[in-house]
């Protein structure tokens, strides 16, 4: 399922150490970039600012990803969203030795894995709607907005029910 959205041509930079170029990528995600709690769903727009630098070993890429993450609060399960701004950098080497994770192929670099890793690693594991979120009430399941205003009458011990009834009679 490779669409080529993350491919960046670098033919003008190959073997020209010292030269540099900026570029911009706009991607519509085809798969979610997410952990189990939060992330960028598929079909969302990612804007990527790139700086491409020619170095002796290959092409050094650095940049920033902008997008919107969506998920749910780990305490109250309310939907939450937040702006993403994630930095990344990686060297795409010319020679494909086993030590190189990323290489220049066909005078292009493929940023998909680099960007996916950077975004997913930046996401919180336990996102909350608000640092002070009190979560859900164990008794009624409602969201506890304010501890002072959310109280239940103490459940009546069933053994007292009979006594109560006697009294009423
Ligand atoms: Zn919450
Ligand atoms: Zn309650």
Image (tube, helix red, strand yellow):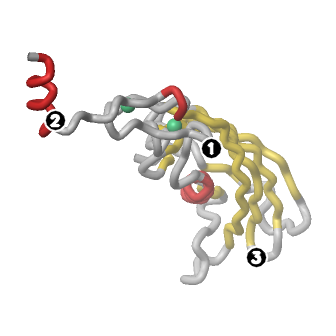
Q: CA distance from mark 1 to mark 3?
A: 45 Å
> In terms of depth relative to the viewer, which is nearer, 59 or 78?
78
Q: CA distance from mark 2 to mark 1?
A: 41 Å
What crowding class fits label 1: few (fewer than 14 Cα within 10 Å), some (14-19), or many (20 or more)?
few
**Image mark for residue 57:** 3
Estimate the x, y position of residue 52 in percent, counting from the top left: 79, 56
User: Is residue 19 rendered to the left or right of residue 122?
Assistant: right
Name, please, the residue furthest toward the bottom.
98
Location of ligand 2 given as a quarter of the image: top left
Of pointers 1 and 3, the one earlier in the residue sequence: 3
**Image mark for residue 131:** 1
**Image mark for residue 160:** 2
**Quadrant of the rendered structure where residue 113 is?**
bottom right
> In terms of depth relative to the viewer, which is nearer, 169 or 152?
169
Label count reads 3
What crowding class fits label 3: few (fewer than 14 Cα within 10 Å), some (14-19), or many (20 or more)?
some
Estimate the x, y position of residue 1 in percent, counting from the top left: 40, 46
């Amino acid at each position: 399922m490779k669409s080529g959205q993350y491919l960046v041509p670098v033919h003008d930079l190959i073997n020209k150490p010292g030269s540099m170029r900026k570029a911009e990528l706009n991607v519509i995600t085809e798969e979610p970039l997410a952990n189990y709690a939060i992330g960028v769903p598929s079909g969302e727009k990612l804007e990527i600012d790139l700086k491409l630098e020619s170095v002796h070993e290959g092409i050094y890429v650095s940049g920033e990803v902008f997008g919107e993450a969506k998920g749910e609060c780990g305490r109250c399960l309310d939907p939450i969203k937040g702006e993403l701004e994630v930095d990344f950098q990686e060297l795409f080497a010319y020679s494909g030795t086993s030590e190189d994770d990323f290489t220049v192929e066909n005078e292009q670099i493929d940023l998909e894995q680099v960007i996916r890793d950077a975004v997913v690693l930046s996401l919180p594991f336990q996102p909350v709607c608000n640092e002070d979120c009190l979560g859900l009430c164990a008794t009624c399941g409602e969201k506890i907005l304010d501890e002072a205003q959310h109280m239940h009458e103490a459940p009546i011990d069933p053994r007292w029910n009979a006594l109560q009834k006697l009294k009423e009679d």
